[in-house]
């Protein structure tokens, strides 16, 4: 396999983008990526999108996106693994370049979520759960994560305040990110007094409904060196894993096995341990998920995610910063775009261009993108290649 | 020719239901509705009240202040989204009840919550054109909110009527401006009992865009600044939107507090901003400037600048004040009675 580098990132300001359609979002982010890479033609396009069909009545993005991006006849495909669709698109682009099938590969993630009501959005997102044994019976994602949170609280003594501190920390970081949907700080008290959604999760524990897109451009390390535009950021490890779709079938409701296995695979491929990683972007679709992901990645021991968060381990100035972008909570969560945007943030940190949220020693970064309640997970490890 | 308001009058039903009472039935969080919408209770029409009866009472009160011969009214316009009939005018019922048929022009207006100021706009301009001595424009609604929907907490009933003319004015029209686009934020199809809406789409791209667009264009056209006005009155679908917009546009609380009725009245749709204007005329002194901004889904805003006259305090007490109708004689309903009054539950035939 050839070594693969990321030579371009493309983001747009996320939010309730009433004036922009699904295609507008994907095209804008992709054009920003083309500009950043200094490339205007690609050999392949992989598109991460979960709900184009349910939310927008639009399938067949493998035709739509190249068409509107001015890349007619380019091989293209749409990848779907619920909220991990974006990460999967990047992995696919990686395989295209690594295998020699393509020299320049674009991965774009997109989701247009505000064309439907809140109720319809919740129903659509529940398509990532087990339709026969979960969603059909009325449970939605806040409910599923609330069950996991309750179990975590009961077993490990994780507190309501520790959950709140995840949201507070991510909003602190998001306030420094001009692309974030909610770029403002919040307090622990605001989280604890926000509207109850599914006990113990309150509104401020939940990532929002977002319109957004993100794109990255991949090529060989050899090509990247010739461009001389940015520091060469390589993808040194990728891990993909699946787990049972229904949480009732899991080995342990307090553990995210897909995350743990995907991380082991990615670390093995990169020839590293978790101790070699400086920072991470993780899938905080709910505050409890960031805590459980920290534990599954091996950053802390099981049950220590909450106390470690409140102690500042994962803060911008902590020993292991997590979600410097603001995470899903503050930056927004356009499901298909999330995994790609996580990679954009890690690349930005590794290039040293993250502005006020720049980490001083960003050498090796990790992204963790998760589908559903942990039924699929994809991990990328990136580092600067001198 | 100087034209403006000769007389104004209002009607608010005496029944109320509290947000807590509705939230209790639906298992909703009353506190978050009250805080999120800045809304405590809403008016409810009695079983024998509808858009037409409210319009009649409001118009009779307007005529008391106008002190004119009603036979000189050349046009009767009623704006509502709850006209009693889909086909058959409300305007003729009103004109007949006022005793001014048959030599009169009537028309019904419909533009979601903006229909009231549309009726006022046309009445003003017909008088300005010299086509008639007086014209009456009314905003009247018994608005509908589907059971359990967010709208059920705010959809209320009330009416305000304005007799427009060219002399003996209580408020002179200084200028108007309009801001319209095709924006589907809220609608009700034929045969549907309750309207549908686009959730959060009704905020920023709908209410905010049109209200701020109309205010900014009006200020530019009139070469005026927010601080030039003594009062501003907004369309008020809830208590939150107008307050947020007022501050964004550079207005201060003393300017909007008198016209903000929604926290204890609810959203009276076509009657909303006209009732807010009436409450402001109830307390304004002569020679004061009022900016009125309506909003109707679909979507658009009408802006009016009025300047009060010396005649205003002279005729004010000839009819009930808005705060009296709003704060006195209230009777609170339980959800069951409310549901019966609003025909949400029906006896079998």
Image: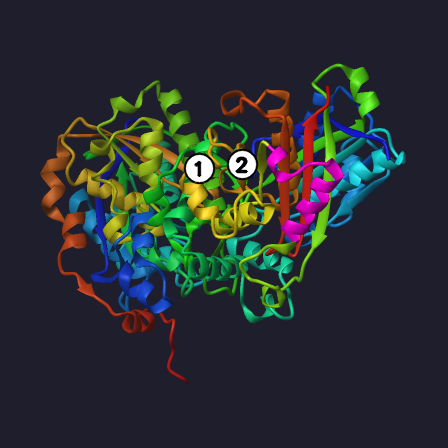
Q: Secondary structure at mark 2?
A: loop
Residue at mark 1: chain? A
Q: Secondary structure at mark 1?
A: helix
Residue A326 locus on image (x, y percent): 51, 35
Q: Residue furthest bottom?
A: B349
Residue at position x 44%, y 37% from top? A169
Give neighbour class at mark 1: few <14, some 14-19, many 20+ (Cα, 10 Å): many
Which residue is label 1 attached to?
A169
**Residue A345 lies in what quarter of the image?**
top right
Residue at position x 54%, y 33% from top? A325
Is the residue at mark 2 from the same chain as the one at mark 1?
yes
Which residue is label 2 attached to?
A323
Q: CA distance from mark 2 to mark 1?
A: 9 Å
Residue at mark 2: chain? A
Q: Which residues are magenta?
A: A258-277
Q: Nearer the viewer, residue B302 or B233?
A: B233
Residue A315 locus on image (x, y percent): 46, 34
Q: Earlier in the sequence, mark 2 or mark 1?
A: 1
Report whether B183 appears left or right of A222: left
Residue at position x 75%, y 47% from top? A79
Report whether A336 appears left or right of B277: right
Q: Residue furthest top?
A: A228
**Residue A201 lies in what quarter of the image?**
bottom left
Q: Nearer the viewer, residue B100 or A181?
A: A181
Asked if labels 1 and 2 touch by Cβ distance under 8 angstroms, the answer is: yes
The secondary structure that most of the magenta stretch takes on is: helix
Q: Nearer the viewer, residue B288 or B2?
A: B288
Residue at position x 19%, y 38% from top? B281
């Amino acid at each position: 396999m050839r070594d693969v580098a990321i030579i371009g990132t493309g983001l747009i300001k996320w939010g309730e983008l009433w004036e922009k359609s699904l295609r507008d979002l994907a095209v804008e982010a992709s054009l920003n990526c083309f500009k950043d890479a200094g490339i205007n033609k690609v050999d392949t396009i992989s598109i991460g999108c979960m709900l184009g069909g349910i939310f927008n009545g639009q399938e067949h993005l493998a035709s739509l996106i190249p068409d509107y991006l001015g890349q007619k006849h380019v091989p293209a495909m749409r990848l779907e693994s619920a909220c991990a669709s974006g990460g999967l698109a990047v992995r696919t682009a990686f395989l295209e370049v690594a295998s020699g099938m393509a020299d320049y590969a674009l991965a774009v993630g997109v989701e247009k979520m505000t064309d439907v009501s809140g109720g319809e959005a919740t129903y659509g997102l529940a398509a990532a759960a087990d339709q026969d044994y979960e969603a059909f019976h009325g449970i939605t994602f806040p409910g599923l994560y609330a069950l996991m949170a309750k179990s975590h609280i009961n077993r490990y003594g994780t507190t309501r305040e520790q959950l709140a501190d995840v949201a507070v920390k991510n909003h602190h970081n998001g306030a420094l990110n001009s692309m974030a949907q909610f770029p403002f700080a919040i307090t622990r008290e605001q989280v604890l007094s926000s509207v109850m959604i599914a006990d113990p999760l309150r509104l401020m524990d939940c990532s929002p409904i977002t319109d957004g897109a993100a794109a990255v451009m991949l090529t060989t390390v050899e090509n990247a060196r010739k461009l001389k535009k940015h520091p060469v950021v390589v993808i040194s490890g990728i891990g993909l894993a699946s787990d049972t779709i229904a949480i009732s079938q899991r080995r342990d409701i307090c553990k995210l096995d897909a995350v743990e296995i995907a991380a082991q695979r990615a670390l093995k491929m990169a020839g590293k341990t978790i101790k070699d990683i400086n920072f991470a972007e993780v899938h905080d679709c709910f505050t409890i998920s960031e805590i459980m992901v920290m534990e599954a990645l091996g950053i802390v021991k099981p049950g220590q995610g909450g106390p470690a968060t409140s102690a500042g381990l994962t803060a911008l100035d902590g020993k292991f910063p997590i979600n410097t972008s603001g995470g899903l909570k503050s930056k927004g969560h356009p499901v298909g775009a999330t995994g790609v945007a996580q990679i954009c943030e890690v690349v930005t940190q590794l290039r040293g261009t993250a502005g006020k949220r720049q980490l001083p020693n960003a050498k090796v970064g990790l992204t963790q993108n998760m589908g559903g309640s942990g039924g699929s997970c994809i991990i990328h490890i990136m580092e600067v290649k001198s | 020719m100087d034209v403006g308001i000769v007389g104004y009058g209002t009607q608010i039903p005496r029944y109320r239901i509290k947000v807590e009472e509705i939230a209790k039935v639906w298992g909703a969080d009353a506190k978050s509705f009250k805080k999120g919408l800045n809304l405590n209770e809403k008016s409810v029409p009695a079983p024998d009240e509808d858009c037409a009866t409210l319009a009649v009472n409001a118009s009779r009160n307007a005529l008391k202040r106008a002190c004119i011969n009603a036979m000189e009214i050349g046009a009767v316009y009623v704006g509502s989204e709850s006209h009693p009939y889909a086909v058959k005018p409300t305007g003729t019922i009103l004109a007949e009840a006022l005793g001014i048929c048959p030599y009169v022009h009537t028309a019904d207006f419909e533009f979601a919550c903006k229909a009231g100021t549309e009726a006022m706009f046309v009445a003003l301009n017909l008088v300005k054109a010299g086509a008639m001595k007086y014209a009456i424009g009314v905003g009247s609604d018994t608005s509908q909110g589907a059971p359990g929907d967010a709208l059920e907490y705010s959809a209320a009933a009330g009416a305000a009527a304005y007799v427009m003319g060219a002399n003996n004015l209580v408020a002179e029209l200084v200028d108007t401006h309009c801001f319209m686009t095709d924006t589907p934020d809220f609608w009700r199809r034929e045969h549907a009992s309750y309207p549908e809406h686009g959730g959060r789409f009704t905020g920023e791209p709908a209410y905010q865009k049109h209200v701020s667009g109309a205010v900014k264009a009006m200020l530019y056209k009139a070469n005026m600044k927010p601080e030039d006005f003594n009062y501003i009155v907004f369309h008020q679908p809830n208590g939150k939107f107008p307050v947020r917009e007022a501050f964004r546009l550079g207005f201060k609380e003393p300017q909007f507090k008198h016209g903000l009725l929604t926290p204890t009245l609810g959203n009276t749709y076509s009657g909303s901003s006209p009732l807010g204007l009436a409450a402001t005329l109830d307390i304004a002194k002569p020679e004061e400037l009022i900016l009125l901004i309506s909003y109707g889904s679909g979507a658009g805003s009408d802006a009016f600048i009025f300047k009060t006259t010396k005649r205003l305090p002279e005729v004010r007490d000839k009819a009930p004040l808005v705060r009296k109708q709003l704060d006195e004689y209230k009777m609170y309903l339980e959800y069951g009675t409310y549901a019966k009054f609003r025909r949400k539950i029906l006896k079998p035939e």
